[in-house]
């Protein structure tokens, strides 16, 4: 009878050991990466050990599985021997049923549930003994991994799923929260991830909409133009717009005016200003530059303004630090900004839109989902979808929207009318088309 009690104690000890392995596996895989990183940075040695163990997940999981299965097999064997000693050959069935219930309940379900609910705290507690077990079982776990590679072949290269995981977490958090502030925060986090996928040409201001200065103009006219402009920086060209020689900052111009005004009539001295000399050197960037790289470049160079060129070096437009920041936090308006320059709402619910308005700005302002992979402006999108250069008055329906060409100059669509809701044409077409012709 004493032998039976000894075997019972051995079985209990093995079930406890199995529970330890099961809970350790759950805790170490479910523990928060972010919290372990923060604790490790604060000097928590247990958190640093958890990070180290998770850094080699194959060895960790392999060692735990080897230990857990060895303990379960041994516990079942001991239980079978004890049952046979008590009731004979029929004890095999009894031991099988009893050990299945005990192992599932006390060595799997309960310990794993506890470890999952207290993953961070439990992982810190068991990190040291698990490290010792992993170290002891390294040869065996390495051999098992080698055998798996021989039988199954080498695992394919893992795709970069980290970003997808982050996007999924952000989306789940956004769906679970009804707080407007939380939703805006999640939208910003998603936008940060987008910086690595968007290029400068997708957010730049096209050259047709850039406020530029001809260095050959009369300085007094240039000063008047700059003072009435809502912008603080203007590209400066000489002769033709493609020949950009610098960027004029309004502060540099004001300093030059102050120096010129000292001791002499302002009007006479303004005409002596050398705009090309006042302008700072231009900073050119390729149109294919990713936004994240451009943001880093702005920070490194301490620049806020860049001129965008294509693969042939031709001027395409401008991009600013504010443009990139707006991709993250949304529109940043100041006292000089318009709601959306070139997009004017009409009484009938439609919008008169300049052809050079970018699709991304239009999507944000009107809450649309127009694609911007084939064209960056609304006129370019209409040309791409229609596969022709439409005449004024022609209408199209794309993406559940109605477009009408209002003005066309040469091959350039300068103004469009957009309806964001389906409307019957009835008498509106004739009336509105008459007004649009002026």
Image (cartoon, rainbow, N blue to C red):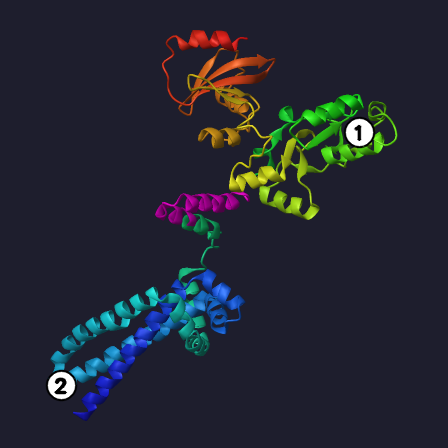
Report which quarter residue 199 is drawn in.
Answer: top right
Q: Is residue 368 left or right of residue 43?
A: left
Mark 1, residue position: 275
Numbered circle sitting on residue 86: 2
- Specify whether residue 108 is in view: yes
Q: Residues within 10 Å of mark 2 (few under 14, many from 20)?
A: few
Report which quarter residue 336 is drawn in.
Answer: top right
Most extreme residue toward the right, as rendered? 263
Residue 312 drawn at (x, y percent): 69, 31
Q: Is residue 198 left or right of residue 248?
A: left
Between marks 1 and 2, how big is the CA–CA gap? 105 Å
Q: Is residue 180 left or right of residue 225?
A: left
Q: Quadrant of the N terminus?
A: bottom left
Residue 289's place in the image compared with 344, above or below, is below
Which residue is depicted at the point 11% across and 83% down? 87
Which element carries disc 1, helix, strand or loop?
Answer: helix
Tell which tag, 1 or 2, sits nearer the viewer.
1
User: Which region is colored magenta?
Assistant: 170-198
Residue 74 drawn at (x, y percent): 28, 79
Residue 242's place in the image compared with 149, above or below, is above
Numbered circle sitting on residue 411: none
Secondary structure mostly taken by the magenta-highlighted segment of the chain: helix
Residue 303 drawn at (x, y percent): 69, 42
- Specify whether residue 146 is in view: no
- Closer to the chain start, of discs 1 and 2, is 2
């Amino acid at each position: 009878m004493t032998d039976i009690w000894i075997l019972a104690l051995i079985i209990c000890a093995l079930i406890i050991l199995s529970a330890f392995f099961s809970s350790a596996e759950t805790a170490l895989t479910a523990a928060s990466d972010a919290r372990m990183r923060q604790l490790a940075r604060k000097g928590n040695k247990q958190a640093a050990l958890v990070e180290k163990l998770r850094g080699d997940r194959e060895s960790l999981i392999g060692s735990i599985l080897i230990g857990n299965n060895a303990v379960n097999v041994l516990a079942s064997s001991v239980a079978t021997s004890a049952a046979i000693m008590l009731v004979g050959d029929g004890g095999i069935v009894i031991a099988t049923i009893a050990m299945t219930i005990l192992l599932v309940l006390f060595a799997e379900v309960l310990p794993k549930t506890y470890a999952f609910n207290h993953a961070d705290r439990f992982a810190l507690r068991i990190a040291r003994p698990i490290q010792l077990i992993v170290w002891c079982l390294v040869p065996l776990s390495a051999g098992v991994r080698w055998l798996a590679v021989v039988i199954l072949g080498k695992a394919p290269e893992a795709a970069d799923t980290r970003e997808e995981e982050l996007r999924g977490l952000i989306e789940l958090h956004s769906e679970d929260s009804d707080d407007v502030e939380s939703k805006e925060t999640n939208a910003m986090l998603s936008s940060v991830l987008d910086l690595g996928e968007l290029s400068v040409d997708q957010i730049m201001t096209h050259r047709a909409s850039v406020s530029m200065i001809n260095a050959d103009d009369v300085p007094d006219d240039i000063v008047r133009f700059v003072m009435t402009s809502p912008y603080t920086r203007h590209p400066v060209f000489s002769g033709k717009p493609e020949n950009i020689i610098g960027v004029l900052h309004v502060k540099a111009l004001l300093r030059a005016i102050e120096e010129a005004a000292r001791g002499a009539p302002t009007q006479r001295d303004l005409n002596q200003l050398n705009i090309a000399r006042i302008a700072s050197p231009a900073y050119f960037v390729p149109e294919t530059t990713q936004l994240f790289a451009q943001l880093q470049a702005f920070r490194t160079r301490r620049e806020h303004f860049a001129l965008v060129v294509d693969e042939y070096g031709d001027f395409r437009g401008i991009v600013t630090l504010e443009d990139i920041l707006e991709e993250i936090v949304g529109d940043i308006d100041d006292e000089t900004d318009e709601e959306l320059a070139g997009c004017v709402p009409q009484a009938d619910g439609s919008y008169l839109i300049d052809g050079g308005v970018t699709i991304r700005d239009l999507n944000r302002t009107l809450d649309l989902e127009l694609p911007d992979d084939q064209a960056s402006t609304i006129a370019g999108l209409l040309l791409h979808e229609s596969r022709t250069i439409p005449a004024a008055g022609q209408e199209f329906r794309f993406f559940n929207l109605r477009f009408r060409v209002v003005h066309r100059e040469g091959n350039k669509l300068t103004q469009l009318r957009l309806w964001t809701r389906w409307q019957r044409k009835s008498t509106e077409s004739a009336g509105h088309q008459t007004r649009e012709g002026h």
